[in-house]
Each structure stands twice: as structure tokens, then as C-alpha cells.
Amino acid sequence: MKEKIKQIIERYDTIIIHRHERPDMDAIGSQVGLSLIIKENYPTKKVYIVGDENEMCYQAKMDQIDQQTYQDALVIIVDVSVTRMIADDRYLLAKEVVIIDHHQNDTDVEEVAIFYRDASFASAAEMIVDFAKTFAYKITPEAATYLYGGMVTDTGRFLYMKEAERTFALAAYITSFQPEIQGFYDWLYTEPLQRRKTKQLFQNFELTPNFVAYRKNDAKLIEESGLDFQSVSRGMVNQMAGIIEVPIWANFTEDVENNVIVGEFRSRGIGIVDIAKKYGGGGHLNACGASLKDWDEVDQILKDFDERAQTYETNS
């Protein structure tokens, strides 16, 4: 599979890299890291990155390109394989599409030239590092920083791994290219005083009978906090993490713009991705999400989580 991806990259003069909307650091890290590797090893190729921007973009800026650029171009989509989540639907204009994803979802993208999915990898960035290592590609410190950042964040600082020996080996490999680790950590793990104070708005949570912790964040609360949607939705889910009695925690945030309730789900010691898939979502075994129609559907998925937590309690 990796050899086929290498061959298709070498065939195209123009390559455009997409990822999912509302990106996390793994989406940005794998997107930017792959683009920089291609530019470094194939300097005559035109390589672009596209999609929406948020605070997780680190220092990256997306390219502004027109539809004409997609003519006879190769699109590579990283860290996502379902159409409703891909940022910028102009990938449909490309001559060929390659998908590189580590989630468990099947793809509904039509006419994919290569669908490289391997859920044994802990992050899409790890897949890109493995790809680069296989062919001994040159990697710049900037590319290494983004790829290392994607690995760190999607593993929860190497807490969530499926093949730990491989993950650590690839982390060691990418650090040999001198990523800016301290600068990245300073950016990732520090925040303005006002934002830290604002987090107090999200300290409280509710519990189901079997100790599933959850929050419901409506549009009014988001506006009151002054935070962007991503900072509330994904940024606050782990405010409920690390509680012995709580095996599953969920954060539900009202997305008025798209008329859905976005759920972010996490667990410890118990798989929940099948429940996320039941509601049209997906992700990792212990870290996943779904977009729900309304608050009634939120209550339905909480019921499912509560039943799963009861199983956990029974078996623990």
C-alpha cells in the first residue's frame, strides 16, 4: 500500500492535501507534515494544504487556491475518510484521490484510488512518519515538529496506544530530525489567564446512574464564555477525565451554525466507538464523537453509554 502511495505521488505535478474540518493537531500535523515532506523530496512539485483554520493550526496557514488548480491534480485526504467531515469539498474536482486514515470508519468517498486505513496506528501523523521512514525521505525540523505534535496530541501524551513499541519507535525516529519540542509544548500547554479563568464555567457536570459524566453546553453558554466552538466542544471534554468512578465521559455542544449537537466521547478501560458509530459518528475505541440531531438524541446516546458503563461496573 505504501509503495502504491509513493508511486502515485511521483506521478503528479500538483498535489493538494485535505483533512477534516475543525482540525485537531493530528489533522494539522499529518497534513502539514506530509506537505513539507513532499516539497522537500520532490522540489519541482506544487503542493498545497487547504481547509478551515482554528487555533490548532499552530503556525500553519492554509493555501488559497482556485478550482482550476484541481484540474489534473492528486488530492490526498489525511485523518478522515467520511465525506461529511472533509474540509473543502473541492477534492471532488481532483483527478485522483488518496485517503490515509487511522480511524475505524469505512469511506464513503466515491472513486478512491487508494484507501490506506490502518486503525492499529494511534494517529494519522504516526502513519505519515512510518511512510516517510519506509522510503528514507528527507524530513525537515519543521515537518518533524508538526508530525511529532500530531503523535503527542492524538495519543494523549502517549496514553492511548495500540502498538506501543511501534509508536515509541516512530516517535524516536521523528525526534531524530530535531523538531522544536519545547516551543511546541509551550504553545500547546500554556494559555492566557483569562481563558484559564473561563474554564471555571465548565467545571460542573452531571452523572447518569452508572456514573457516565456529561456536560450539555448550549449556544448561550458558548457565547458567555467568549471561547470558539472547538475550545468548548473538544477542549472541555477532559474536564471530566481522571475520576476513578467515571469510566465514560461525554461533552455535548450546541452548534447553531450547522443545527446539530456535537458530542465528544472518551472512556477508560471500555470501548465506546461502536456506540458513536450507531449515531453516525466514529473515531477511536476510547476517543470518538458524533453529530446528533437534537437534545433528545443526546439523551438516547447517554442511555446507551449508561448501559455500557453498567457492563463495565459488572465486569470490574
Image: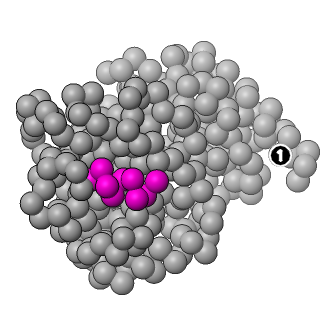
Q: Which residue is mark 1?
A: 312
209 magenta-colored: no
- Front one among 225 and 74: 74
- Front one among 248 and 79: 79
Quarter of the view holding residue 314: top right
> From what the image shows, is residue 309 above or below residue 9?
above
Residue 56: x %, y % from top left: 31, 52
Residue 31: x %, y % from top left: 30, 53
For the record, the magenta segment spans 1-9
Q: Is residue 299 left or right of residue 111?
A: right
Residue 60: x %, y % from top left: 19, 56
Taking the image as drawn, is residue 149 in sight? no
Q: Is residue 62 left or right of residue 214?
A: left
Helix, strand or loop at label 1? It is helix
Q: Amino acid at mark 1?
A: Tyr
Q: Which residue corresponds to the image point at 36% horizontal and 70% vertical from the top-left?
A: 135
Q: Which residue corresponds to the image point at 40% horizontal and 59% vertical from the top-left?
A: 3
Q: Which residue corresponds to the image point at 74% horizontal and 48% vertical from the top-left?
A: 270
Q: Residues within 10 Å of mark 1 (few under 14, many from 20)?
A: some
Magenta stretch: dominant secondary structure:
helix
> From what the image shows, is residue 221 above or below residue 100?
above
